[in-house]
Amino acid sequence: MTGHRFLLAGTTLAAMPSGALWWADHALLAVSDLHLGRSDRIARRGGTLLPPYEVAETLTRLDADISRTSARVVLCLGDSFDDLAAAELSEDHRLWLTRLMAGRRWIWIEGNHDPGPVDLPGEHLRDLTLGPLVFRHVAEPAARGEISGHYHPKARIAGAFRPAFLIDAARVILPAYGAFTGGMEATRPPLCHLMMPGAIAWLTGPTPCALPLKGR
C-alpha cells in the first residue's frame, strides 16, 4: 500500500493518498469529515449548488480504501454528515453504506455538524482512546498522541491547493475525506498554532508529497 509512514506515540501509521489514515497493527482505517449530503444541505438553504454526486464519489473512495486495506475497524472522525437532515440518505446510498459496515467494527465519532448518525448501526462515541492514541473530532492544544479532523487542512504546491495531512510529534490532523468539502490553509491560525516546530503537510492525491509547514 502506498502512503506516508510515520510514528506517533510509538505507533506506526500511514497517511494514504485518498486522505484516509491506516493503522495496520489494529487493521483500523480512519477517515474524517465525510460531510455526506453536503450538496443536499446547501440546496435546502439556497446556497450555490454543488454537483449532486458527492455522496457516491465519497462512498466510492471509501469502498476502495476498505477493499485495499481489508480494514476490520473503520473510524469516522466526526462530521460524517453535513447536518442531521443530510443523514437521510437515499435508499441506494444507505444500502451501500450498510454493506460497507457489515462484518467489521464501525465507529462514529461526534462532530460539530452532527452528533453522529444515531439511526445507523455502529458505535457512537464522543472520542476514542485506543492504546497510546486518542481519536476525536477537534484537536485539543495540550493533547499528545492525538488524531483529529475538523479543519479540512490544505496546502499549496505549484500555485494550487490540495488537501493535506498535518503531522508533528504530538498529533496528526486529517484532511476532509468528503468530496467538495473545501479547506483551510495550513499556515493560517488556528492550524499554525496547533502544530509544533518540524511539522509537515503531506499533500494527498495522485502525486502525494511532503512539505515543511512554514514557520514551524
Image (cartoon, rainbow, N blue to C red):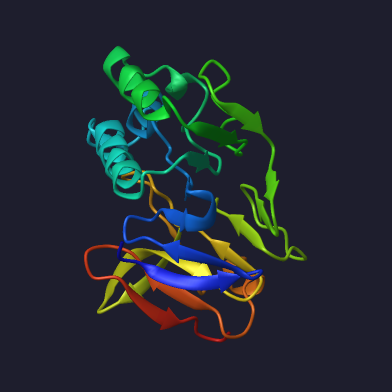
User: Does residue 23 appear in the picture of this structure?
Assistant: no
Instruction: Specify the farthest residue to the right.
Output: 142
Instruction: Using the image, determine if residue 13 lies above or below residue 36.
Output: below
Foreground pick, 25 / 201: 25
Residue 135 x %, y %: 63, 50
Give me the residue at 25% from left, 38% from top.
60
Give me the residue at 60% from left, 57% from top.
147
Task: Tell me where residue 41 sits by quadrant.
Answer: top left
Foreground pick, 31 / 25: 25
Give me the residue at 66% from left, 69% from top.
9
Name the quarter where the C terminus is drawn.
bottom right
Residue 163 x %, y %: 37, 61
User: Does residue 60 appear in the picture of this structure?
Assistant: yes
Give me the residue at 48% from left, 19% from top.
85
User: How many circles with numbers are drawn on the protein?
Assistant: 0
Instruction: Using the image, determine if residue 205 lies above or below residue 192.
Output: above
Residue 42 x %, y %: 38, 31
Instruction: Using the image, determine if residue 112 lies above or below residue 198.
Output: above
Name the quarter where the N terminus is drawn.
bottom left
Instruction: Using the image, determine if residue 33 lies above or below residue 147.
Output: above
Instruction: Specify the farthest residue to the front.
Output: 25
Task: Tell me where residue 50 sits by quadrant.
Answer: top left
User: 162 left or right of 198?
Assistant: left
Residue 132 x %, y %: 70, 59
